Structure formats: structure tokens, C-alpha cells
Amino acid sequence: MPAVASERDLRLDLFRGLALWLIFLDHIPSNAVNWITLRNYGFSDAAEIFVFISGYTAAFVYGKTLRERGPVVAGARILKRAWQVYVAHIFIFVIFMAEVAYVTKSFDNPLYTEEMGAFDFMQQPGPALIQALLLKFKPTYMDILPLYVVLLLGFAPGIWLIVRAPSVALAASVVLYALSWRFEWNLPSYPSGYWFFNPLAWQMLFVFAAWCALGTEDRLRWLLRSRLVLALAIVYLVLAFGTTMTWHMPHLARLMPKPVAEVIYPIDKTNLDILRFMHFLALALVTVRLVPRDWPGLESPLLRPAIVCGQHSLEIFCLGVFLSFTGHFVLVEVSDRIWVQIAISAAGVGIMVGTAALMRWYRMIEGRRPGSRPPKPDASLAGGEA
Amino acid sequence: MTRIALVLIGTLLAARALAGSQSCEVPDYVTHVDAPLTRVSAVVAKDHRLDILVLGTGSSALPGVEGARSAYPARLEAALAKRLPGAAVTVRTEVKTRRTTADMVNDLEKYLLDGKPTLVVWQTGTVDAIRGIDPDEFRAALEKGVAVLSAAGTDVILVNMQYSPRTDVMIAGGAYADNLRLVAQQHDLPLFDRLSAMKHWNETGAFDLSGPNTGHMAEKVHDCLGKLLAELIVNAAHLDRNHSKETR
């Protein structure tokens, strides 16, 4: 059985914290500041980072539970976590409904009669509410938590196989991914369509992360050290960067060879396009090379804010969704001048950091300091909070 | 000294008034597209006429009794008539709210029966985005529609969604806008990027699209859209050149 490192890997918290900030920024539409976010410079975005790190920490934490207390206890704790994520999602949904209720009452512009049709469900909120509880009705930008709930539900029984035979589990996961592409499997949405994040496809990233977490890193060491692989990863990142530039600058669009465009487009987020998956792998590979586990910068106070956010990811994620709504609301209702956009973005990140610090403090006065509990690392969104 | 100051203030005020006045100004790429409109070029040169069908949903119309006259299809007709004095320009509309792309494709052949247009301006995507239609199905429907129109021998311009800051957070249009662009690219059709144009106006302050409809803003926006669309058609079909050649 693979050994479990006792030191908490701060890189996980750091990058998850950064991903939380990026998700917050990306979810404020037409915010000038979201030009800095990852999705503008490559195929993958914060969603991949978030799912990967959560799969990694989940495997790490519950893998340990499984070894110490058996599959039933591990499964039960995962289900409890799924329940917490579900409740958090419903809470965010209620806040969303309140905002929609306000906007539909106050907004009346003949230019947008059709767009207001998006709020038809407010005339009959009953069915929408039931569908929301069933995770079928998910307003825009509220898709990640339902994905999590489903991933955790599958992980509760799946962890047994992932710990016993990680590679068999990974192979099964790849087969499921391939089948979901081949037969276009996805969960249904209300009132029509399918899930924006197809769990049957995205599970591959989650299981892959778990596979990496469970000591298979040793098997991957040669890959991580290979210069050729690093070079390939960098070339791929550069190509992806070039491709995204042709989206932002229409006069560059003609530089994209048509046959290539026909092969690679559309780059499907719903079903975790293989180009996105590879882009994330390349990004992760380069990052792991640049930021080793014992990198002294991880202790620097400059990175502290992101790390603290990453250590309370479920709460900070929900807060981020709420702050995105509120930020967008202020931009629309008060002013959308560029300095307001910058101020809102900065204030949002500030509130996220402040809240995370406050939660850390609460935990400290309760005598449970995260990071100082050597054998039991807190996994926040992935698990931990037993 | 005071005179200089007064002149300066005067210039500043004039500049401000100019900046504040309604302008349809947009980045060049909105009206200069690579894809040609060969059928339009040929028919205008030969028959001196241009029959356009605007196929769309709610955002191709304005409500009220004056709505039809101030919506962009009518503005397009007026703008084209001005640009092409030698040609008879007609714009017919098949605009109905709450239709997905697939709904429109189902009725497409029927629309082509009552007089075949030279050009179809196809505005779509909004309803698909609101209903959360699977983007793959959306693209399949678009492809099918484009195939039907090409088979009928008409030119096609695709029109993407409006920029709607108030509902941005509730309607995820990204995948639909991407697919419209993709289909336009693959079939070499002009895309009228209404989304970017309106976003630009909102950013420059030409129109405050999150505000109330003061000073007939909706009508002015549609007037601009009609003019830009006319500009795009003239550019893509090289009508300026053809036309001036004939009149010379």
C-alpha cells in the first residue's frame, strides 16, 4: 500500500485558492479584470484546477480513512461531504432567485423583451424549485457544485477500487469517459438540455487526480523528470495560447488554418474535451517543475491569502458565487466604469481572503489549527470536515 | 489668457457633445468580414434588385405600433436603399419570438416558397441559450439550416445575440456565440457580430444598455444595427465598387 506523506502539500491549497479567485472573476460577466484569468490564454481554466485538486485531496484524505477504518466509514464520510455540498448549492440557489426576483421587477427595456424570457420560470417558481432540488434546474454559473455532488456520490463506493487497484480504477474511468463521448451520455437538465459539466466525462479528471494522489506519483516520476515531456508540454501550451489569441483578436482569426480549425473546434467544456484535459496536464506538469513541494515561496506572506482561501474551499467557493452575483449586480445597477470593475474585483478577493482568515481564526480558538495537525490534513471541499 | 481658456473650454465642450452624440461607431471587423456574398453581387449587378429575408426571434423586432418601422430590418432596408440608389431593395421579415434554431429550420422551406430571397439574414441563438439547448444540437440545427439555404441558392448572413448586460449572469450565451462563429467560418458565411458591436457601444458609453430605455434608445440601437448590417452587406458583396462602375 502506498505511503501517505504526513506533511500537508501547501501547493494544493495555493492553487485551489488561486482557482477560487479566478472562478469568482470569471463569473462576473463583462468584467475587465477577468482578462487576467487563465481561460483567456489556453484551453483549460480554473474548473480543471478545482476538480483536479479536489480529486487529489479527496483521495488523500478518504484513502487514509479507508485504510484506517475501512470502506464503510470512508464511504459514509464522503456521503456526508456530498450532503454538505448539496446544501451549500441550494443556499446559493435561493440567493440567485432573490436577485432574479429583483431584476425582473425593476427591468423594463423593449430592447430585451426576448432575453427577459429567461425569467419565465419566476411565474411558476414551484416546478423550478423542485427541479432545482433534483439538481436538474441549475442557473448559469451554478454548475460546479452539482458536478461535485455527483462526483462524490460516485466516489463513495468507488474509493474502494481506487485504493485497492488505482490503475484498474483509472482504466474504468477512461472507458466511462470514452463511452460518454461515443454514446453522448449526459444527465438531463430542466427545462431542457443537459448538464453543463457532464459528470460522466469530468469524472475522468477527478479519478486521474485520485490516481496521482495514491502514490502513483512514484510511477510518474520519470515522466515528470523527462526533458522531452517538458518540452512537449511547453510547445502545447504555446500553441494553445496562440489559438486563444485568434479568438480575442478577430483580425488574427484568418491565421488559423481551416483544416486545423475543423479538427479542433469546438473545444467542448461540457464533455471535458481531450484538448482541455491535455492542456491542464501540460499546465500541471510545468507548474510542478516550477514550484517544487518544498519551494520556500510557499511560506511567504505574499501567497498566504491564496493558501488560506484554498484551505476553506467549499465556504469560499460559495461566497465567491454570491460575490460574483453581487458584483455583477453593482456593475449593472450602479456603475460599470472601469475603476468600479477593478474595485469590485479587488473587494471581492479581499472579502474572500478576510472570510477565510476569520474561519481559520475560529478554528484556532476551537483548538483545531489547520496545517498544524500533522497526520490529519484538512481537505476542505474534498473532505476533512468530519 | 482668459480667451485661450474660453476657447479651450469651448473645444472641450464641443468634443464632449460630439462624444455624447449617438454614434454607431464600431471596430472595423464588425462590418469588414472576409466571407463574400457572391449571389448578392451577381443579382444586384444583373437585375438591379435585392430581396432580403430577415429570419429571427424577438430581438429582431421592437414592440409597439411603431415597432416594425423602427426595428433593424426596416432600418436595414432604408439604409440599403440609400446606399444602392440604382437597385430595388426589399426586406421581408419572418420574426417570431421564442423560437429555437431547430424551430426555425422546421419552417425554413415554407418561408422559401413565398418568393425566394437573394439573401437571408438569420438571427438566432438567444432562445437556444435561454432554454439551454445542447450546444451540439444547436450547431447541428444551424448546419442544417445553412445547408437548406445554400441548396436554395441564397446567400446567408448569420447574426449572433444581443449584448444584454442585465441578463448576462442568467443567460450563458458563450457556447452559442462560439458555435455561430464556427459555422460561419466553416461555411464561409459573413457573421454580423451584433454581440461585439453592442458591447462596444456599452463600453464607450454610446449607449447605456443596462439603463432604462430613455430617449428612444432601443430605436436608436436598432437604427445603428440596420446601418451596420447594410455596411456589412455592401462590403461583403463589393457593391460599392460594382455600383460605381455602373454609374460611371
Image (cartoon, helix red, strand yellow):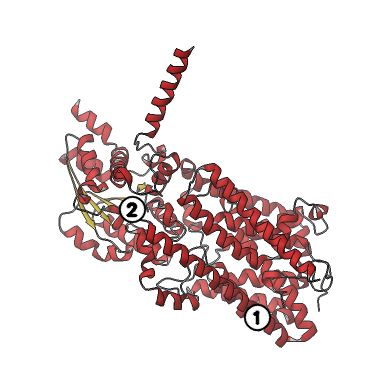
Quarter holding residue B95? bottom left
From the top left corner, tell me how far across and down residue A244 is, in percent. Answer: 54, 49
Q: Residues within 10 Å of mark 2 (few under 14, many from 20)?
A: some
Kind of residue sitting beneath label 2 = Asn
* Residue B201: x %, y % from top left: 40, 42
Which chain letter goes with mark 2?
A
Q: Decide which of A305, A43 is in the foreground and name it.
A: A305
Q: Secondary structure at mark 1?
A: helix
Dot in front, 2 or 1: 2
Disc on res. B59:
none
Q: Is residue B225 visible to the viewer in this orientation of the structure? A: no
Up-down relation of residue A326 to residue A312 (above or below) = above
Q: Position of residue B185 (x, y in %)?
A: 41, 50
| Place of residue A345 in the rendered image (x, y in percent of width and height, measured from the top left) | 59, 50
Residue type indicated by callout 1:
Lys
Residue placed under numbered mark 2 in the picture: A109
N-term-proximal mark, 2 vs 1: 1
Q: Mark 1 packing: few (<14 Cα in 10 Å), some, or many (20+)?
A: some
Horizontal side of A158 relative to A292 (left or right) equals left
Chain holding disc 1: A
Q: Quadrant of the N terminus of chain A?
A: bottom right
| Marks 2/1 same chain | yes
Picture disc at residue A80: 1
Q: Element type at marker 2?
A: loop
The answer to whether A343 is drawn above or below residue A132 in the figure is above
